[in-house]
Image (spheres, rainbow, N blue to C red):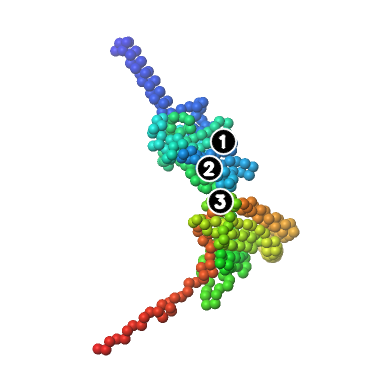
Amino acid sequence: MNQKTLIGLAVAALVAIVIAVAVNHANKPRSEGGGEAAAYLAPALRDHVNDVDKVAVTGAEGKTVATLTRGADGWSLAEKGGYAADTGKLKEFLLKLADAKLLEQKTANKDKYATLGVEDVAAKDAKSVEVDLGGLAQPVKVIVGTANARSGTFVRRAGEAESWLASGNITVDRKAENWLRKDLVDVPAARIAAVEVTRPDGKVVRIAKEAEGDPNFKLADVPKGREAGSDYTVNGLASSLGALRLDDVVPAKDAMPGDKLLKARFAAFDGLVVDAVAWEKDGKDYAQFTATADQDRAGKHIDATQAKEKADYDAAVAAHAKNADASKSADEPVKPASVADAAKDRSEKLAALDKEVADLNKRFNDWTFVLPAYKYAAFNKSLDDLLKPLDDKKGDVAKKPKAPPPKAG
């Protein structure tokens, strides 16, 4: 092999290497300044998630889906009158967006955008969602398309022709109400002493516990000849405020109570009282709530609690003294706060109750809530709903026709 041939082969090999490097480079995500951050969908968001102060979500026909803004009291949702937003959900979404990497270049042909769901949101039937973030040093506006749990999500930076497959399942909720903070109140049935429901017809249903710690509620005003229903049925009325979440929210001025109202009062052993006014309209279940403190009940509850804690402590001290010789290493009982300083303990408990009432009313005041149907049904009970069904067997026997007498043979 002569020198000329060797040179030719070397040049060919070099060209092949250059082409391979160029192809490999073309298949990598484009750089926007070099370094590792260039591979990310939104480099400006990396390490700056906490700087975001506005998130605007836009859907088909350029219609605003949700506008979330951060203020002195936290995040709120403009489309719902400024009600509190779900900060956990929002942060999770922003972190997914910040972590998303550009995996594979897709089409730059706008006529093919719709197949990936990354078309301009101004389109009437757009399947895409545009996310615009505020508060960052550099603006971030991304069009989010179809997501695939296995491969990732199709995306396109607004204003750019190129579309991409990005890592992660970047789903954007398209309903404003789903960005709301949904948890409303959580008063478990074990804390409730009594419930009173006044129905639209004026009839009243009452249940109560004789003492704190009793497993079951007793139904009042059981008619003669009838029996209370199962413990499960009666106790269910007191569970209405347990882990109560809203479906939607409306400013109270835009959704005032109607004529046929259901009123309920939930009184806790420790003095917390939550009043509800509820009604049905257009297939939805609405309610307004108010919290108050029953100081008399609270005081009696503290007295009972302190007395029990003192009795338990005294018994523990006596047992320790009796067993001192047998177990010299045993630690002395720890004096509870209610025994060490009963007045201070009382003051702190009352202050905690007042704070709970204030916090609840801050969430309740000036709002009408749309409740899940099953929660509304939990306290929409008549007295008959809480009674055992009537035994109709005797009536059935009486109504059953007598068998005709046998024919004479």
Q: Marks 3 and 2, how far apart in space?
A: 14 Å
Outermost residue, bottom side: 408
Looking at the picture, does residue 263 appear above or below residue 110? below
The amino acid at mark 3 is Val
Q: Is residue 46 left or right of residue 302?
A: left
Outermost residue, top side: 3
Look at the numbered disc 3 and give the secondary structure of its residue: strand
Residue 282 or residue 121, whichever sits in front: 282
* Quadrant placement of the N terminus: top left
Residue depicted at x 40% and y 36%: 114
Q: Give the image location of residue 80, x and y in percent.
A: 56, 47
> Which residue does the numbered mark 1 point to in the structure image?
134
> Which residue does the numbered mark 3 point to in the structure image?
249
Q: Is residue 5 left or right of residue 162?
A: left
N-term mark: 3 or 1? 1
Q: Marks 3 and 1, how far apart in space?
A: 25 Å
Report the disc number at residue 66: 2
The amino acid at mark 2 is Ala
Density class for disc 2 (Cα within 10 Å; few <14, some 14-19, many ≥20) is: many
Residue depicted at x 48% and y 42%: 172
Residue depicted at x 55% and y 75%: 223
Q: Marks 1 and 2, how far apart in space?
A: 14 Å
Looking at the picture, does residue 92 appear above or below residue 335? above
Question: From the viewer's perspective, is the residue at label 3 or at label 1 nearer?
Answer: 3
Outermost residue, front side: 259
Look at the numbered disc 2 and give the secondary structure of its residue: strand
Look at the numbered disc 1 and give the secondary structure of its residue: strand
Residue 378 or residue 125, whichever sits in front: 125
Q: Give the image location of residue 187, x and y in percent.
A: 59, 58
Q: Give the image location of residue 188, x and y in percent.
A: 58, 59
Q: Give the image location of residue 2, x and y in percent.
A: 30, 11
Decide if residue 316 is in sight here.
no
